[in-house]
Amino acid sequence: MGFCEYELRLINGNLKLHKSKKYNKDIKSIDGAICFLLDHYDIPRLAIEKAFVLSYDMNGNFNGFMQIGTGDFKEVQIPLSTAFKFLLLKNAAGCIFVHNHVEGSDLVPSNGDYTMHTMVTTTCTALNIELFANIILQNDYEYYDIKTNKLEEIE
């Protein structure tokens, strides 16, 4: 089946999804999606924070993602309007939000991470989009899921 990386583009005055890259692989789990991002963006070695949103269809299949933010070494601003435009245009039934913390910082949510999680959760509920996870990455072997407030190992 595969999935695509997307960008939002304004075409003739209309907001459209543009496929920037296509990947011919299937990802069946949250860990699989995380491993893809870790490998593709070499996240543990980034000196800046980046944020992504991952889309899932009504059958629970991962069907695309988009980078939604680039920050500095301390934080990334996540434009929720951009993230949810992407999810609505993909007709997403579920999603995962992901961002990284740079090496040397804590792999625990900041106050800003908790505030953003509350806004993401509220918006997902209003739009009837299931939030599967809200993940902070920092290394190749574990992540913190803000939704469950747990440090998880990547299998």
Image (cartoon, rainbow, N blue to C red):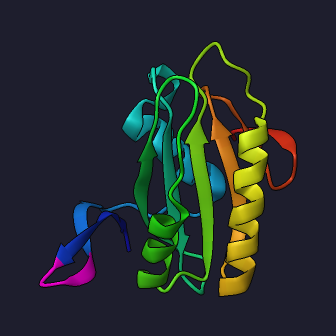
Quadrant location, the N terminus: bottom left
Q: Nearer the viewer, residue 42 or 118?
A: 118
Which portion, as a residue range, is magenta?
Answer: 11-16
Quadrant of the rendered image containing residue 132? bottom right
Quadrant of the rendered image containing residue 133? bottom right
Name the residue: 78% across, 31% down: 108
Kindly give the residue lying farthest to the left in the view shown: 12
Name the residue: 61% across, 28% down: 138
Residue 46 vertical placement versus 121 (above, below): above
Q: How far across and down, in percent of the image, does residue 28 sit?
A: 58, 64
Can see residue 128?
A: no
Quadrant of the rendered image containing residue 13? bottom left
Residue 64 vertical placement versus 68 (above, below): below
Image check: 147 left or right of 80? right
Image check: 120 left or right of 84? right
Q: How far across and down, in percent of the image, does residue 6 sit?
A: 32, 64
Name the residue: 38% across, 40% down: 40
Image check: 31 left or right of 84? right
**Magenta segment, principal secondary structure?**
strand
Is 56 contained in the magenta span? Answer: no
Figure disc tally: 0
Q: How far across and down, in percent of the image, does residue 123 sit?
A: 68, 75
Q: Which of 78 and 86 is in front in this view?
A: 78
Q: Nearer the viewer, residue 135 or 12?
A: 12
Residue 128 vertical placement versus 4 (above, below): below
Kindly give the residue lying farthest to the right in the view shown: 149
Quadrant location, the C terminus: top right
Can see residue 29?
A: yes
Q: How far across and down, in percent of the image, does residue 141 sit?
A: 66, 29
Image check: 43 left or right of 99? left
Name the residue: 59% across, 17% down: 103
